[in-house]
Every structure is written in structure tokens, then in C-alpha cells.
Image (cartoon, rainbow, N blue to C red):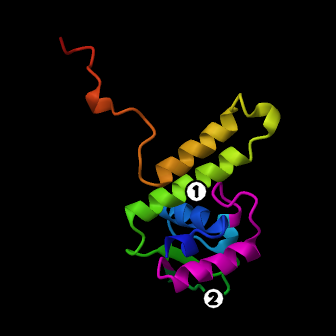
Amino acid sequence: MLERVLRHAARPRILLGLSAEGPMSPTELSKSQFGKGIQANVCSYHFKELARFGLVQVADRTPGNAQGIRYEVTDRLTQPLLDAAALATISDVIMDIPEPLAQWIEQPYIEDIRAFVKASGRSVEPDKASKPSDTQQ
């Protein structure tokens, strides 16, 4: 199932976006950091496919809502699936780095990678609890 779920690059981004930011419509997601570069109609199709897999569901259908139907993740979206989605998305971001910049990863790419990792539920910040504080001796 994992291969079918993550078959298209839009699907991991949708899962990460909904997990991180809560219910969104395909249009809202296409305008977010997670849907950057994905057309709303493509998002709409893949939202429906993810619903077919039971990973997202309709959150609300507000008549006259210009943003359309909003979706949310279901409890079938597990941490391992979020991790796989984050890795797939990070791989796509890394692969999109232009060749001349490949050896020098610029800040926007680092910010994208951190956002995808954070959306997976994994911390990108060092564990502050494990650091000794200045008051400890």
C-alpha cells in the first residue's frame, strides 16, 4: 500500500500539509508551503485518492465556500507513513536543487527540509532537555 500511496509526489506533500496545518482544501494546500508548485486540480485528484486509501476524509463542506471541500487526516495515518512521506518529500526537494548549487545548499531549501521533517512529527531542533544548563554544575 505504501508504494501506491506515495506513488505521486503530491501525495506525501498533502499528507504532511494536513498533518502539520490541519484541515485544508486542495486550493489552500496548493497555495501553502507544502503544495508549492502543485496545481489545485492536481491536489484535488490526489486528495480524493488519499481518501480512497482511508488516509484523509472530508472535514467540512461549507456551501458557497470559495475554497471548496476541506479535508483532514484520519487515524489511519501512522507515524511510519508520515516518516515515509517526509523522506519522499525531502528527496524531491534535494533532487530539485540546481546542479551549480548542489554543493552549497541554500537557506530556502534548508527551511523546506526542516518544515517537512517537523510536519512528520520529528523534531529538527536539538533536544534541549539533554543539554546541560548554565545553572547546573
Q: Earlier in the sequence, mark 1 or mark 2?
A: 2
From this view, report whether residue 18 is shown above or below residue 62.
above
Measured Cα–Cα span from mark 1 to mark 2? 35 Å
Q: Quadrant of the C terminus?
A: top left
Residue 70 on image: x %, y %: 58, 77
Left or right relative to 8: residue 19: left
| Magenta-colored stretch includes residue 117 | no
Q: Which residue is mark 2?
A: 63
Number of dots carrying numbers: 2
Quadrant in which residue 76 is drawn: bottom left
Residue 12 on image: x %, y %: 58, 64
Residue 20 visible in the current orientation: no
| Magenta-colored stretch includes residue 34 | yes
First to last magenta residue range = 30-56
What residue appears at the point 77 percent right and 68 percent down from the top-left corner?
39
Q: Which residue is mark 1?
A: 88
Q: Residues within 10 Å of mark 1 (few under 14, many from 20)?
A: many
